[in-house]
Image (cartoon, rainbow, N blue to C red):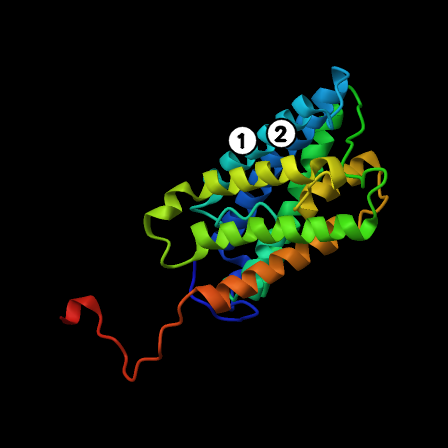
Amino acid sequence: MPVRGYTWGRTGEATHPDSMRAAFSEFISTLIFVFAGEGSVLALDKIGQDTTSASGLVAVAMAHAFALFVAVALAANISGGHVNPAVTFGALLGGRISLLRSMYYWVAQLLGAVVASILLRLTTAGMRPLGFTVAHGVGVWNALIFEIVMTFGLVYVVYATAIDPKRGSLGTIAPLAIGFIVGANILAGGPFDGASMNPARAFGPALLGWRWRDHWIYWVGPLIGGGLAGLIYEYMVIPQEPPTAHQPLAPEDY
């Protein structure tokens, strides 16, 4: 990850091949994640099992954890493996990514989720994606707080294992840790609001299934939680290097 620095984006970044490759990587990774995640929900529905049952909940949590582990791992060396607009937003507020590249990532992530949902409709003989809904008896504000807290935990893990410059060898387990926290949060929040933690994951199925009830929760909650995690970890956890009084010598000058 680059050092902190708030910027709109360098000249030429919009058309630079690296930007295109990174955006494409986010598109593919998000497509893989949403296809497997939403697909696991539709598969349970197909066999007549409720996703809120104990075994159904575990199956969905494991599918999301496995899929996200793979999605982050395959994009980590190209785009950073965000696979989530809330993660990108946290990195943006922490000054780890330019606004221009953030916009590329957001578009790619949303498109990946939409294409994944289209493929699911085609491969499941027209089953409508179920997406996310607030469970009966759960208030919208309860669901919003759930999404804030769960996404805070997710983005905090991303910062600790993938962004922190002092992460060292911990970075090798970043995809696994990120997948695990999503799976754990689904076990905790799934019966209440579905545990999205990802606006793209919510948007694709909502669009193809045309289910918009309380959809705003799955944007506002993750963006608030991800933004808070990025700011807190960046400014309270990562040690700040004091400014140097001179330009460091290049290695070949020693």
Q: Residue at (57%, 48%) from the top-left corner?
A: 154
**Residue at mark 2:** 36
Relative height, residue 126 to residue 238 (above, below): above
The residue at 73%/56% (across/down) is 220
Q: Quadrant of residue 47?
A: top right
Q: Quadrant of the N terminus?
A: bottom left
Of residues 191 and 112, the one nearer the viewer is 191
At 69% from the left and 31% from the top, the residue drawn is 38
Quadrant housing the C terminus: bottom left
Looking at the rendered structure, the kind of residue marked 2 is: Ala
The answer to whether 107 is drawn above or below residue 250 in the figure is: above
Spot occupied by residue 212 in the image (x, y as percentages of width and height) = 84, 43
Gap between marks 1 and 2 measured at Cα = 9 Å
Q: Helix, strand, or loop for circle 1?
A: helix
Residue 115 versus residue 235: which sits nearer the camera? 235
Badge 1 or badge 2: first in the primary sequence: 2
Residue 179 position in % (x across, y down)? 53, 38
Q: Is residue 27 above or below residue 67?
A: below
> Please, which residue is most extreme toward the top here?
47
Residue at numbered disc 1? 66
| Nearer the observer, 139 or 203 | 139
Q: Which mark is residue 205?
A: none
Instruction: Name the kind of residue labelled 1 in the image.
Output: Phe
